[in-house]
């Protein structure tokens, strides 16, 4: 069950608008069920977001509701993108913020791929 289960998925969120073509994005890779694009406010030299095309608010929502095809597609895309942008050569980090405590800003599931530089400790103290 998604953390924001009391709230319905909001079709007006920024990533839904990107998926509908209402807002531009710098696409890295697209597949039947997923889209990868550069983060508008990169926090590392490589900072790419991978999202499902379906309306899922969080990882737990996705795991519960998405089809096996959607889950396989997103999972494979994360790995493929990490290689395509060269993040795999010296190491990279995956992150998905879920809900308020994690500071999730956009209520459409997204996986951050960070790389291109030393990434420091896993969590800020
Ligand atoms: P999070 O805090 O995990 O929900 O991360 C949301 C990310 O989305 C944040 O790193 C900035 C990025 N972002 C917000 N608006 C846009 C946008 O319009 N385009 C792109 N490419 N990224 C965006």
Image (spheres, rainbow, N blue to C red):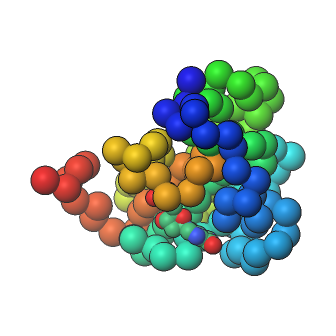
Which of the pair 73/85 is nearer the observer?
73
**In this picture, residue 109 sits left or right of residue 72:** left
Decide: is 24 above or below 48: below
Residue 39 in view here: yes
> Which residue occupies the extreme left position in the image?
125
The quadrant in which residue 119 appears is bottom left
Q: Where is residue 112 in the image (x, y as percent from the top left)?
A: 50, 55
Left or right of 13? Residue 98 is left
Residue 56 relative to residue 112: left or right: right
Horizontal and vertical percent position of residue 46? 47, 69
Judge whether 79 appears above or below 105 on screen.
Answer: above
Q: Which of 25 and 47 is in front in this view?
A: 25
| Residue at the (39%, 71%) spot, across then down | 43
Residue occupying the point 70% across, 50% down: 10
Q: Which residue is drawn at 76% across and 34% down?
A: 70
Q: Can residue 94 be seen in this view?
A: no
Taking the image in four quarters, ligand 1 sits in the one at bottom right
> Image quadrant for the N terminus?
top right
Which residue occupies 33% across, 69% down?
117
Residue 24, x across and y down, in percent? 75, 77
Could you tell me residue 95's position as x and y percent?
Answer: 44, 48
């Amino acid at each position: 069950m998604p953390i924001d289960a009391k709230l319905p998925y909001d079709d007006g969120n920024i990533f839904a608008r990107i998926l509908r073509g209402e807002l531009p994005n710098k696409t890295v890779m697209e597949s039947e069920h997923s889209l990868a694009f550069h983060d508008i406010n990169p926090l590392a030299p490589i900072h790419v977001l991978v999202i499902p095309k379906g309306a899922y608010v969080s990882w737990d929502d996705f795991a519960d509701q998405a089809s096996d095809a959607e889950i396989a597609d997103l999972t494979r895309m994360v790995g493929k993108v990490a290689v395509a942008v060269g993040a795999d050569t010296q190491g990279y980090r995956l992150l998905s913020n879920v809900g308020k405590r994690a500071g999730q800003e956009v209520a459409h599931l997204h996986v951050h791929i960070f790389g291109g530089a030393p990434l420091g400790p896993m969590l800020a103290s």
